[in-house]
C-alpha cells in the first residue's frame, strides 16, 4: 500500500471515528449520571444539523450553529424534565423504553417539520470540490473541521469535569448518588444538566458533519448504533475510552475496504460489538470491577 | 320527544349507510403503494404528489368514461413487508382495478406474484429490468430499462475512448440490478470492469472506497449507479480527493435534489435520463414536449418543488391506466390488462409507450436522453 493511500484511509477513518466518539461520549455523560443508555442520542445530532440549516436563512453560519446548539440543549432539558425527571426510581428497562420512545417521537416530529429530504449546511471553507493535500493524500477542509471540533469538545469536556464545581458535582453524582444527596447536591438537576450537555455536544457534531454526511430526519438511528458500539468498546462511562474506541473503529472500517468488499463495512462494526460483549463486556478500556459496581 | 329525535337521527344514519355504497359504486378504484415517507421518499414523495394532482385533474374534467377516479394511497415507507400486506389489502378488500407502484424494485419483486395470483394489473414505478423480464402477464413497469441505460452509458464511453471502468452501486434492488447489467453488457462494448464495489444506501462518507478505486491506475471512468442520496456523496468524495475522472451515473440521478446535495461536485456528471428534466429545452413539435411542459408547470406551481424523473414514472402509470380503461370501456381487471398490452404510441412523461404481449415496459432506448449537469442544472449532453 502506498503512503498516499495509507494516509487517505487514515483520514477517512479518523473522520468516521471522531463522529462515533462524540456520539459515544454523549451516551457516557448520561450513563454516568443516570445509569441509563439514552437511545435518543443520535436524534440530538440530527436536530443540531436540521435546526442550523433552517436558521441559516436568517442568520450567518456561526450564529446559526450557535443558536442551533443552544436550542437543542433546551430541547434536551425539556425532554428530561417532561419524560424522566418526575419518575421515582424507574427501572433500567423502563428508562430504555422511554428513551427509545423519545427517539421515535423526535424523528416523527422532524419528518413533519423538515420533510423527508436530505439537507446540508454549506462547507465552512470552500465548497464541495475544494481539496487540500496532506502527505500526498487529498481531503476536504471540512474533514479538519470535524476532527478539530471533536478534539476541542473532548478537551473542554475533560477540563469541565476536572476543574469546575458543576463538573465535579456531576462526577460525584455518578460515583455515589446517595452520598451526593447527603452533601446537599440535587442529583435531579445533575441529570437534567447531563441531558443538556450531551444534547449540546451532539448538536455541535451534527453541525460540523452536516456538509460531509448531510442531515436527514432519520440519520439518528444509524449513528446511535455506531456510537453505542463505540461506548461499549471503550467501556461504558469512560470518555477517554470512547475517543480511543471511536478512532479505532473508524480506522478499522476505513482500512477494511482494502481487504474485503465495502458491503461488509457495517458487519465489521457489529462483529466487533458482539465479540466485545462476549469476551470483555466491560469494554477494552473499562475496568471489570467498576462495571460490576454499577447498578446496570 | 328526545326519543323521536334520536330515532329520526338513527334512521337517517341507517339510510345514509344504505345510500352511500350505491353512490360510490360507480367510482373507479385505483390503488397506489408508494414510499411517501421513509428512506425511499425521494421516489415515493413526488410519485404520490403527481398521482394526487392527476386524479384531481381527471375528476375535475368529469373522470374517465364519466366515472370518478378514487385513489387509495398506501404509504409503504419503502418496506417490502408493508408493500406485501398493502397489495393483498388492495386486491382482496378494496378490489381496485389496478395498482400503481411500488416505488422501489425490491418491493415490486416481493409483490409481483401477489398481483399475478390476484389477477390485478400492477403498474410499477420501479426501474429494475427483472420486473418485466421474464414477463408476468399482470405486471408492467414505466421506467426505462436498466440495460438501455447501460448501453447509453457504454456508447458514450466508446466515443470518449474510455475502456477501463470502476463500478460503484448502492445496495438497493436498483443498485444490484444495475451492477448485474453493467457487468453483463461490458464485453459487448469492449469495456473492462477494473473495480466493482457496493455501498450502503445509508452511507454518510465513502472516501475510503473512493481512495481504493483511485489507487487503481487502470481506472479511466467511474460508473456510480444508485437511486439514493449516497450517490451525491460518491461524487463529492471523488472531487475532494482532487480526482478529475469522468463520472457516469444512472437514471436514478434524475432528481435535482441530488445535484443540490453534491453541489459543485455534480458539475459534469454524465447520465441518461427522461426528457422531463429538460422539458422546455426540447424542440417544438417533439411529441412529448407539450405534455412535459404542462406537467412540469402544474406540478411546480402546485407543490413549489422541482419536478423529478421519479414523479414522471407515476405520471406514466396513471396515463397508461387511463388510456387502458378508456380503450377497454370497462373496469374489469382482465379487460384492462388486455387493453394495456394493446396500447401503441402513447406519449407520456418518460417516453412513448408501445406495449405488446412480450414487452411490458413499452419503451426503447429512445426514451433516454444523455444529460449532464452545468451550473447546478440539468442540461442536454453534450452541453451547448
Image: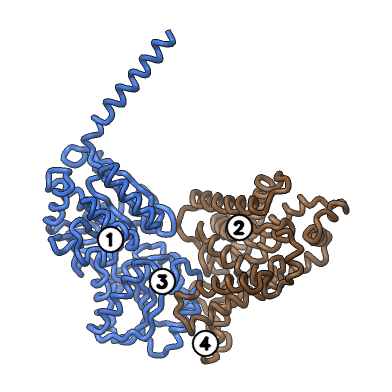
**2 and 1 marks in contact (CB < 8 Å):** no
Tell me the chain of label 2. A
Same chain, labels 4 and 1 = no
Find the distance from the CA under tag 4 to the CA under tag 2.
36 Å
Numbered label attached to residue A39: 2
* Residue A119 seen in render: yes
Label 3 chain ID: B
Q: Position of residue B64 (x, y in %)?
A: 19, 42
State the mark number for residue B276.
1
In percent of width and height, residue B364 lies at 18, 67
Residue B225 position, x and y percent, is 36, 72
Chain B takes which shade in the image? blue
State the mark number for residue B266: 3
Q: Which chain is brown?
A: A
Q: Disc 3 versus disc 2: distance between alpha carbons?
A: 36 Å
Q: Can residue A18 be spotted in the picture?
A: no
Q: Mark 3 falls on what kind of element?
A: helix
Determine which residue is flagged by label 4.
Answer: A5
Amino acid at each position: 500500500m502506498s503512503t498516499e493511500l495509507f494516509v487517505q484511509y487514515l483520514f477517512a477513518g479518523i473522520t468516521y471515528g471522531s463522529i462515533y466518539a462524540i456520539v459515544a461520549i454523549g451516551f457516557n455523560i448520561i450513563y454516568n449520571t443516570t445509569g441509563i443508555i439514552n437511545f435518543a442520542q443520535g436524534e440530538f445530532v440530527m436536530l443540531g444539523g436540521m435546526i442550523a440549516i433552517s436558521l441559516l436563512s436568517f442568520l450567518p453560519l456561526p450564529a446559526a450553529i450557535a443558536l442551533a446548539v443552544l436550542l437543542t440543549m433546551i430541547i434536551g432539558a425539556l425532554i428530561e424534565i417532561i419524560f424522566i425527571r418526575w419518575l421515582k426510581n424507574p427501572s433500567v428497562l423502563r428508562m430504555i423504553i422511554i428513551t427509545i420512545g423519545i427517539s421515535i417521537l423526535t424523528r416523527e416530529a422532524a419528518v413533519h417539520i423538515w420533510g423527508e429530504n436530505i439537507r446540508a449546511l454549506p462547507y465552512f471553507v470552500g465548497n464541495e470540490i475544494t481539496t487540500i493535500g496532506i502527505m500526498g493524500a487529498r481531503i476536504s477542509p471540512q474533514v479538519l473541521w470535524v476532527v478539530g471540533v471533536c478534539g476541542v469538545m473532548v478537551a473542554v469536556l475533560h477540563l469541565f469535569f476536572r476543574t469546575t464545581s458543576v463538573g465535579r458535582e456531576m462526577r460525584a453524582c455518578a460515583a455515589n448518588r446517595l452520598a451526593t444527596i447527603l452533601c446537599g447536591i440535587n442529583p435531579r438537576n445533575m441529570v437534567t444538566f447531563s441531558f443538556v450537555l450531551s444534547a449540546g455536544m451532539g448538536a455541535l457534531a451534527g453541525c460540523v458533519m452536516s456538509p460531509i454526511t448531510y442531515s436527514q430526519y432519520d440519520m439518528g438511528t444509524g449513528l446511535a448504533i455506531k456510537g453505542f458500539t463505540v461506548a461499549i468498546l471503550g467501556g461504558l462511562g469512560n470518555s477517554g475510552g470512547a475517543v480511543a474506541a471511536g478512532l479505532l473503529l473508524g480506522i478499522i472500517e476505513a482500512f477494511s475496504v482494502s481487504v474485503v468488499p465495502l458491503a461488509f463495512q457495517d458487519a465489521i462494526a457489529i462483529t466487533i460489538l458482539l465479540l466485545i460483549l462476549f469476551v470483555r463486556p466491560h469494554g477494552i478500556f473499562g475496568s471489570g470491577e467498576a462495571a460490576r459496581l454499577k447498578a446496570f | 320527544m328526545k326519543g323521536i329525535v334520536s330515532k329520526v337521527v338513527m334512521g337517517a344514519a341507517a339510510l345514509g349507510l344504505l345510500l352511500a355504497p350505491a353512490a360510490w359504486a360507480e367510482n373507479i378504484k385505483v390503488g397506489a403503494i408508494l414510499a411517501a415517507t421513509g428512506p425511499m421518499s425521494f421516489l415515493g414523495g413526488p410519485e404520490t404528489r403527481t398521482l394526487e394532482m392527476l386524479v384531481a385533474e381527471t375528476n375535475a374534467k368529469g373522470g374517465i368514461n364519466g366515472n370518478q377516479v378514487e385513489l387509495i394511497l398506501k404509504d409503504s415507507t419503502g418496506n417490502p413487508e408493508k408493500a406485501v400486506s398493502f397489495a393483498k389489502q388492495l386486491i382482496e378488500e378494496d378490489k381496485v382495478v389496478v395498482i400503481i407502484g411500488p416505488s422501489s424494485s425490491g418491493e415490486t419483486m416481493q409483490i409481483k406474484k401477489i398481483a399475478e395470483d390476484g389477477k390485478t394489473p400492477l403498474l410499477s414505478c420501479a426501474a429494475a429490468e427483472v420486473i418485466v423480464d421474464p414477463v408476468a402477464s399482470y405486471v408492467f413497469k414505466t421506467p426505462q430499462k436498466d440495460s438501455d441505460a447501460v448501453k447509453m452509458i457504454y456508447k458514450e464511453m466508446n466515443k470518449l475512448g474510455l475502456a477501463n471502468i470502476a463500478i460503484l452501486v448502492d445496495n438497493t434492488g436498483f443498485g444490484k440490478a444495475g451492477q448485474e447489467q453493467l457487468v453483463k453488457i461490458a464485453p459487448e462494448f469492449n469495456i473492462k470492469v477494473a473495480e466493482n464495489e457496493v455501498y450502503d444506501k445509508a452511507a454518510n462518507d465513502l472516501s475510503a472506497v473512493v481512495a481504493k478505486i483511485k489507487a487503481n491506475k487502470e481506472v479511466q471512468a467511474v460508473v456510480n449507479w444508485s437511486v439514493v442520496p449516497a450517490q451525491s456523496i460518491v461524487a463529492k468524495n471523488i472531487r475532494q480527493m482532487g480526482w478529475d475522472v469522468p463520472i457516469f451515473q444512472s437514471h436514478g440521478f434524475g432528481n435535482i435534489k441530488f445535484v443540490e446535495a453534491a453541489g459543485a461536485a455534480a458539475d459534469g456528471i454524465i447520465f441518461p435520463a427522461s426528457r422531463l428534466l429538460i422539458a422546455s429545452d426540447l424542440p417544438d413539435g417533439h411529441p412529448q414536449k407539450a405534455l412535459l411542459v404542462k406537467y412540469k408547470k402544474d406540478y411546480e406551481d402546485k407543490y413549489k418543488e422541482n419536478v423529478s424523473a421519479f414523479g414522471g414514472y407515476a405520471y406514466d402509470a396513471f396515463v397508461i391506466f387511463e388510456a387502458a380503461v378508456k380503450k377497454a370501456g370497462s373496469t374489469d381487471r382482465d379487460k384492462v390488462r388486455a387493453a394495456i398490452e394493446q396500447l401503441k404510441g402513447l406519449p407520456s412523461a418518460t417516453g412513448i409507450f408501445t406495449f405488446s404481449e412480450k414487452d411490458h415496459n413499452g419503451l426503447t432506448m429512445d426514451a433516454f436522453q444523455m444529460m449532464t449537469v452545468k451550473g447546478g442544472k440539468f442540461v442536454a449532453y453534450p452541453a451547448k
